Amino acid sequence: MPQDVDYIPVGVAPLRKNIEFYEGGTCPKCGGKAHREVDVMDTFVSSAWYMYRYFDPQNNEEPFTLEKIKDWFPMDWYQGAQEHYTAHLVYARFIAMFLYDIGYLNVEEPIKKYVSCGLVVAKDGGKFSKRLANAPDLDIEVKKYGADTLRMFVQFVAPFQENSPWDTSVILGITRVLNRIYRIASENVDGKRHKVRIDTKVKYNKVIDQVKRSFIDLNWNVAISRIMDLVTDIKKDKFVDISIWKDFIKILAPFITEELWEMSGEKSSVHLQKYPRRIKLNNESVNIVVAVDGKKRAELKVKANEARSKVVTKAMQKVHNYGINDTSRYTYVKGRIINFISK
């Protein structure tokens, strides 16, 4: 195999660009000149076993030892796109079973849980690939927009398990959001306690709940939407309560938050802080949505700690024209929405 191979992607296999190697073959049948095969092995095969080597990288006698890796496998979590599920995962499982049979691995199945994730694709849905050399240069994009902007864009533009189209208009929207947050830190945070409006408390609690749910449901795009709603609400105040602001930074992490945390007067890393708690709402009033079959039909002002039975009774009076009565089923999310089912 040649040593002077150019691996910069241009749409063909790297070995194909080495003319001496590519055209230097001999036909096994006629003995004449022949082109060598340059697509020699699926890259997924190469990457199907090297995770074991990570735990024993200095071993010069064998790839790794069972003693070094036995406590690390099976892996708890594996995520990848569809081609990983149908190619890389197949190779990884096959090689693991082979290694188990010859005594190098103590488990047959190397992975406990597989989660499929989407790809970053072209705006028209087409796939980026090294072979086609059609992907944006991330070094250039990071210099243009900033790493935090691109990280938030990828999490926001689509649900985790769906493809994310590369859309500069959405990237610019994320840039505006982060700039708005930074302006609030610079202009509206004075390090003091201030009265917090009930609307802000309600939105804050929604963000707290949604971010936690998103780590379970893998829908960080929804969490970021809720964060954007809270930013819009906070921006209405001349000054932002420092306690609310610090908790907001914890929720927003990791996006630009180390700098925001330092600007708020803190010294240690924001990533060492505990996740914030919901604000207790006592006798304050909140507006909840009253819906029928998922469609908003009215709004209702209730006490934040009002009993469920009273909320249901009041809400039912708002939508009795839609066939809602005492026998109607419903779901209620405290302080947010009650949804009646008409049939």
Image (cartoon, grey):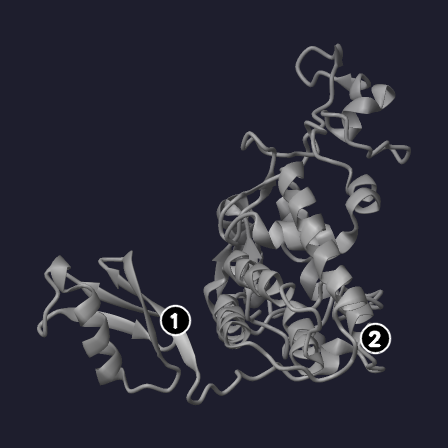
Q: Position of residue 166 (x, y in %)?
A: 63, 38
Which residue reaches farthest right?
4
Horizontal side of 216 relative to 171 (left or right) equals left
Q: Nearer the viewer, residue 75 or 246?
A: 246
Horizontal side of 279 relative to 285 (left or right) equals right
Q: Secondary structure at mark 2?
A: helix
Q: Nearer the viewer, residue 45 or 178?
A: 178
Task: Specify few, some or many for label 2: CA neighbours under 10 Å numbering under 14, 14-19, or 20 or more.
Answer: few
Image: 115 above or below 174: below
Q: Position of residue 285 (x, y in %)?
A: 41, 80
Horizontal side of 194 relative to 267 (left or right) equals left
- In the picture, which quadrant includes the C terminus? bottom left
Q: Which residue is denoted by mark 1 in the rendering?
A: 287
Image: 175 above or below 12: below
Identified at 77% across, 19% down, the residue is 25
Q: Position of residue 194 (x, y in %)?
A: 67, 82
Q: Amino acid at mark 1?
A: Asn
Q: Nearer the viewer, residue 238 or 174?
A: 238
